[in-house]
Amino acid sequence: MSAGSARLLPGGPVAERVFAEVAEGVAGLRAAGVVPALATVLVGDDDASAGYIRIKSRQAAELGFASPHVHLPASATQADLHRVLRDLNDDAGVHAVLVQHPVPGHLDYDRALQVLDPDSDVDGMHPVNMGRLALGLPGPVPCTPAGIEALLAFHGVPVAGREVVVLGRGATLGRPLAMLLAQKRPTANAAVTVVHTGVADWPRYTRRAEILVAAAGVPGIVRPEHVRPGAVVVGGGVRYEGRRLLPDVDESCARVAGAITPRVGGVGPTTVAMLFRNALRAAQRAAGRGSAEVDDEGAVVGDGGAGGGGGGDRG
């Protein structure tokens, strides 16, 4: 952030701790003769998507995962994609699956997701997993919301009993985050309000927030006048202009906030870390080893964090 007095809340140290825990868990599985596997599926030749897959494959190797990859041509049909996912469901050596988003325009990502075994859904976005989250049942949690809860816990930001406002209602961030932070848990248990750009006077809500999470996917939508002085501000939504990252939170908000995530290296690293935590716990479930519902800090409900990546919920 540029000149400002707000304390920074970087995601890198949070991710490092989670990766260390994941590596330890992977080592335990391997010692028991189980090689955890995170499969990736890419449709088409989008350079950015291919780059994300390469990064995740490298991280998987560093953590000790096998990382089988299926690359379908851009001309692949919906039936082709469903066939691949069913094959992965049936493969006992594959524990977690990531379908890289977006898929080519003629394909329906949501339909494909419903073919996937919910327990191997590393992004936590299968309708069954969203239902588990709503009911407070164990299961993969969407990665960015889980990462935000872990980030706040790591940096000692109290959440329980405080007023949290989430600006954004999308399925990947705003809605699941609201459900997550409202659950009864030491690192949650907040009074959560969800507001969006369809509400003309949305700043009336954000200005009262003790913790404000921007999840709209609208660059620069949150400015200093929208922030309560001393509030904690988390930039969850981003958009890209080429390779340039455009966050929801304007950097000038650091002059008003008490604590704030950095423009780069905030929520992003924690999202990736939670994806691998989901993958580990999928392998643990398959091996019958189970996993604790809550980590040492009390963060992250269910069987772990969740996956997914950048973007924002737009509104």
Image (cartoon, rainbow, N blue to C red):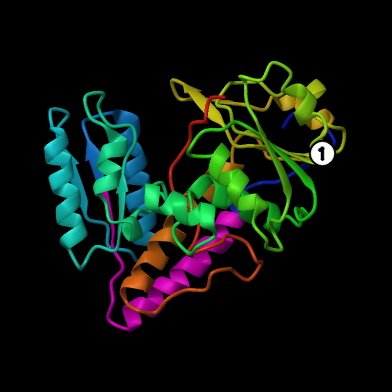
Which residue sits furthest right?
229
The residue closer to the viewer here, 57 or 167, is 167
Label 1: how many Cα within 10 Å (few below 14, some 14–19, many 20+): many
Q: Position of residue 7 (x, y in %)?
A: 79, 43
Image position of 64 with respect to 87: above or below: below
3 falls in the magenta region: no
Q: Position of residue 266 (x, y in %)?
A: 61, 42
Which residue range is magenta in the image? 14-40
> Which type of secondary structure does the marked residue at label 1 adopt?
loop
Residue 151 in view here: no
Which residue sits furthest top?
200
Measuring 53% from the left and 52% from the top, which residue is drawn there? 134
Measuring 66% from the left and 67% from the top, which residue is drawn there? 297
Q: Which quarter shows the N terminus? A: top right
Q: Is residue 71 left or right of residue 154?
A: left
The residue closer to the viewer here, 13 or 77, is 77
Q: Which residue has dot 1 on it?
A: 231
Under mark 1, the amino acid is Ala
